[in-house]
């Protein structure tokens, strides 16, 4: 049997994708819409407070294309808190005018493929990766993925050393994007339909295309990567929420 990589887990994560039901939203009076926007902004204010206390983090992005209109990504210490946030949003007025289109449940994960000699829970760098404050980058890219388990291409049958050397090569490519793309890998084995969620943040959306393309040629992606749907979007700052939902 090949050895399982050891993993470190941080905050639990929910990616919640919503389409806006514009037809019914438009039927509300302007006052009703204002009240719904106000209520949603108060919810965001609450999440900001939690984030300020470093007890979680969140990101709000519009999504380009028909897969969704916006995405909320929330990170919290427990699965219960993530669940509460989901329900809290669902109870808002705005939620009545949204349709859930996709969601993803996972937990921030680091593995020991790139070994380090320090106690990970004493390392500020590792702690910052396990409990990340999500950046306010202009763009986000999210997709779930698996490592292939088929015939001769079974990641889970490979010796640790082989997997480690492929992950080293993966990390080297990734490192060339330092300062341009920030990645958050969340593990979802046992939680959701794929094995990992990949969330990328960048101020330049083209860097997603370049990075993901370059990785396709790298063995771990070329031979073992299997991908779900891709979502790409733009930062939705709080002061733009009203504008997004504005009806003339
Ligand atoms: C910004 C770029 C970037 C960088 C620097 C980077 C580095 C690293 C390192 C050092 C490590 C291993 C240790 C750890 O930290 O866990 C990983 C781990 C992982 N990655 Fe990665 N990755 C990046 C980016 C990056 C991308 C774009 C993808 C999607 C792949 C693609 O083809 O579309 C990805 C996937 C993963 C996954 C699924 C894992 C977990 C695999 C497992 O079997 O456990 N990743 N990754």
Image (spheres, rainbow, N blue to C red):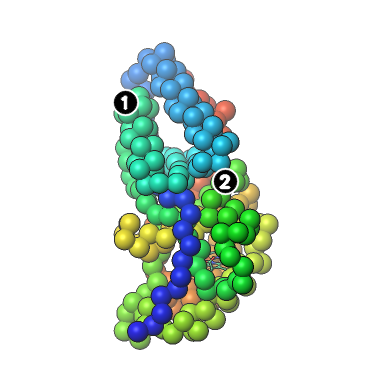
Label 1 environment density (alpha carbons within 10 Å; few <14, some 14–19, many ≥20): few
Measuring from the top left, give residue 73's x and y in whole percent: 46, 44
Measuring from the top left, give residue 199's x and y in whole percent: 50, 55
In the shown orientation, is residue 111 left or right of residue 203? Answer: left
Residue at the spot of label 2: 133
Please name whichever residue, 187 or 248, is drawn nearer the observer in this view of the structure: 187
Can residue 73 be seen by looking at this rendering? no
Please name whichever residue, 104 or 94, is drawn nearer the observer in this view of the structure: 104
On screen, residue 230 above or below 81: below
Residue 2, by quadrant, is bottom left
Residue shown at the point (43%, 55%) measured from the top left: 107
Residue 157, by quadrant, is bottom left
Circle 2 SS class:
loop
Between the residue at mark 2 and the residue at mark 1, the CA separation in whole angstroms equals 35 Å
Instruction: Check if mark 2's residue and mark 1's residue have beta carbons within 8 Å.
Output: no
Q: Nearer the viewer, mark 2 or mark 1?
A: 2
Can residue 148 be seen by looking at this rendering? yes
Measuring from the top left, give residue 151's x and y in whole percent: 31, 84
Please name whichever residue, 228 or 136, is drawn nearer the observer in this view of the structure: 136
Q: How many marks?
A: 2
Residue shown at the point (35%, 37%) measured from the top left: 84
Label 2 environment density (alpha carbons within 10 Å; few <14, some 14–19, many ≥20): some
Mark 2 and ligand 1: say if the CB distance to the nearest ligand atom is below 8 Å. no
| Quadrant in which the N terminus is drawn | bottom left
What numbered label is drawn on residue 24? 1
Query: Which one is earlier in the sequence, the residue at label 2 or at label 1?
Result: 1
Circle 1 SS class:
helix
């Amino acid at each position: 049997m090949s050895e399982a990589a050891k993993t470190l887990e941080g905050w639990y994560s929910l990616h919640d994708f919503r389409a806006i039901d514009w037809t019914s939203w438009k039927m509300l009076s302007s006052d009703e819409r204002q009240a719904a926007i106000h209520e949603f902004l108060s919810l965001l204010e609450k999440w900001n407070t939690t984030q300020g206390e470093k007890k979680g983090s969140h990101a709000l992005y519009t999504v380009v294309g028909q897969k969704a209109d916006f995405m909320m990504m929330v990170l919290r210490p427990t699965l219960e808190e993530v669940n509460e946030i989901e329900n809290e949003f669902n109870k808002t007025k705005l939620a009545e005018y949204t349709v859930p289109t996709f969601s993803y449940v996972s937990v921030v994960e680091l593995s020991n493929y790139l070994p380090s000699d320090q106690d990970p829970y004493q390392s500020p760098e590792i702690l910052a990766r396990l409990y990340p404050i999500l950046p306010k980058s202009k763009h986000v890219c999210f997709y779930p993925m698996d490592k292939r388990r088929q015939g001769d291409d079974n990641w889970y049958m490979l010796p640790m050393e082989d997997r480690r050397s492929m992950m080293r090569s993966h990390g080297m490519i990734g490192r060339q994007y330092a300062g341009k793309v920030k990645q958050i890998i969340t593990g979802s084995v046992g939680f959701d339909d794929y094995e990992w969620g990949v969330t990328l943040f960048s101020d330049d959306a083209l860097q997603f295309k370049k990075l993901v393309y370059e990785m396709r040629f790298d063995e771990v992606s070329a031979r073992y990567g299997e991908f779900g749907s891709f979502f790409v979007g733009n930062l939705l700052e709080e002061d733009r929420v009203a504008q997004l939902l504005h009806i003339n």
